[in-house]
Image: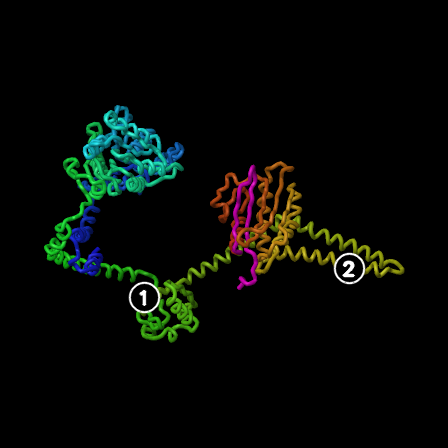
Amino acid sequence: MIGDVNRWFNSAPFVATTSARLVMLVALICAPSLALAQGANTKSKNLLALYWYGRDYPTNVLYEQGLLRALRADSQGGPEYYSEYLEVDRFPEAEQTRLLRDYIRQKYAHHHIDVIVAAAETPLEFLLADRSLFAGVPIVYTAFEPMDAAADGSTPGVVGVFIVGVYSKTLEAMRAIHPDTRQVFVVTSLPNAGGKSRENIIRKELERFEHELTITYLTDLPTSALVDQLSHAPPKSLVLYVRHAEDSSQRALDPVEAASLLARVSSVPMYSIARTYFGQGIVGGYLADHEVIGAQAGELALRLLSGTRPDSLQATSATLAPMFDWRALERWKIDPARLPAGSDVRFRVPTAWDQYRGYIVGAITLLILQGLMIAALVVQRSRRREVEARNAAMLSAAPDMMFLLTKEGVYLDYHTSDTSQLFTKSASFIGRHMIEVLPANVAASFATAFDRLSREPGPIIVEYALPMIDGDRHYEARVVPCRSNEILAVVRDITDQKRSQQALHQTQADLSRLSRLTALGEFAASIAHEIRQPLTGILVNASTCLRWLGHSTPDLSEVRAALSDVVEAGQRANEIVRRNRELFRHHTIQMTALDLNAIIRDVESLARLRLQASNVRLITTVGADLPPVYGDRVELQQVLLNLMVNSIEALEGVAADERQIEIFSSLGPGGSVTVSVRDSGVGLGGVDRERMFALAYTTKPSGSGVGLSISRSIVEAHGGRLWAEENAPRGATFSFTLPIHSPASVT
């Protein structure tokens, strides 16, 4: 705060400072002590304010400012303040109101509310529609007249602040200012049922003028129609602007902007009833100041919080002040003498005294401000010393090492809480270049980071290892610029983190192998069946060869053909053994360009007998001419096997003639290939979608919870994505994508 004061004095010559700025400066200097004094009060009560529209709606902003001002004026510090915004102009549906009521009920279930302030009729209707929402909690509400449900005594604990007579008083002032008026246009809009009651209030108040004036209500007209109507308003007519916030397409408009637009295009003077629209081109009127009204509601709320019974409080009438805009008076050539007595005329062109009295006030208060400045500087110095002491304590407790170097790499200073962490003694590196201190490769890495800092804002992260007494240790340095020609390196020992990562990678590899070994047991019958066919061929051809050799004159051509068949069958058996051995042995990842369709066919062969034993029909639809993907064949086979096993198990409770699995492969979006496994099983009912891919999560009595977790890890390590979707009417589809192989991208 004091730094802001210093910058204010240095920004411009002091002689140009107006009295308003001087007062603001004094407020800024005193604000910290006031805030500390106020913060010392304890708040044991809770107040909830409900507003009609959104947080940024101008009327809500003014009302909340006044309400908070009144609450904070309480000597006890005021209650804890909560606020909610119904926004019924944007969400008028009954279902939205019900959902909002449920949301508020749950939100404040564990927060006792002592008083509720309803800033308009609609929030009160919202509360009274279900009094159990805040049962027994007294309500202070604001309205243009007492609400029936609150005024007839059937709803105890409700007290109001009423804006009574604002329309009739404003119209009376309009007639006094323009005595020859013959017609008045009333501009309003009714966004919901609450707005309809507002129009009834307007009509009721203005009813007594209808025998002297023609009152035309322009309600819910499109903006274009309003512009046309007001721009061609006849002479001796006036406009009373209440509200306009919705055009013919039901697009929400800003009522303040609408007031400004209509005031500009209107061919006759336009008045209003709310200070919210003041300064937007309206002439003025008896304006309801929602900041003052909010303060009145706050005072009633404080009395309720202090223990006063609601039925002992009298309703309060809002203060209505006649206020007019000098610029609009000049535009319409209105004589200020015709204004009501006590009118507040704003934006008047200042006189010479009004323009220059700030210099005089500034000169008079100069000595006072100088004294305040000296006191502020003393306080600032004391606080700076406290901050320095606190920072020193924080540095001593920090585990990181810090090194200050020049941009050329010369050590200037350092900080460490443990000198045993240093690579060498401080006397050996302070004032020396890092090339003379660090290993060549580490110094080169830091030199590269320093060079990057000249082009990038930082921080630049450098990881490196140093030989220490207890072995190699790993470090992470964050390099950032510090002043014009200095660089700060914050170094952290990450040796334990590196070891943990290595252990984690080893554990994931072991889990992956365990998953493959589990699949080996499930598909043993399929493997045996695949090998039986080539072995049978070998036996048949070998027997045939023996018979030919048993002849007195063997036919060598037949013998040679039989032996060729034996060799071919043996090679086929060897390929089956090799393929399954690669899948289930201890595996080292080998990333190559792969044909996903070929992997699908391999897995289909491996799972054939398991599918037959489970009475599951398999349909495979592969995309033609799919580009290759870059990955490990064995790991991708494992992913597809895991998904097929899940689908087979999901079909166990389905009728045999309805068991079906479909496998699709196709070209996916964004340069990827998509593989999907779709089944007609039990689907994802009862499955936690957030945790289904987490390790050890399973819904099967005998499941390990490893398959889907391993599959997701493999797919993500290949740069892809694995997800699940519910089928209609039943079943589930598991899909994964893999990026297309690009030789240029492989490094």
Question: Residue 97, image x and y in percent?
Answer: 37, 34
Q: Is residue 662 left or right of residue 17?
A: right
Question: Residue 341, image x and y in percent?
Answer: 14, 36
Q: Nearer the viewer, residue 667 or 738?
A: 667
Q: Nearer the viewer, residue 89 or 354?
A: 354
Which mark sits nearer the N-terminus, 2 or 1?
A: 1
**Rounded to the nearest whole Å, what is the CA distance between mark 2 and mark 1?**
78 Å
Kindly identify which numbered label has been placed on residue 564: 2
Q: Is residue 670 left or right of residue 102?
A: right
Span highlighted in magenta in the image? 718-747
Q: Nearer the viewer, residue 347 or 101?
A: 347
| Residue 273 part of the magenta-drawn span | no
The amino acid type, in three-letter code, at marker 1 is Cys
Crowding near the residue tagged with mark 1, few <14, some 14–19, many ≥20 C-alpha atoms within 10 Å: some
Kindly identify which numbered label has been placed on residue 482: 1
In the rendered image, the quadrant that contains the N terminus is: bottom left
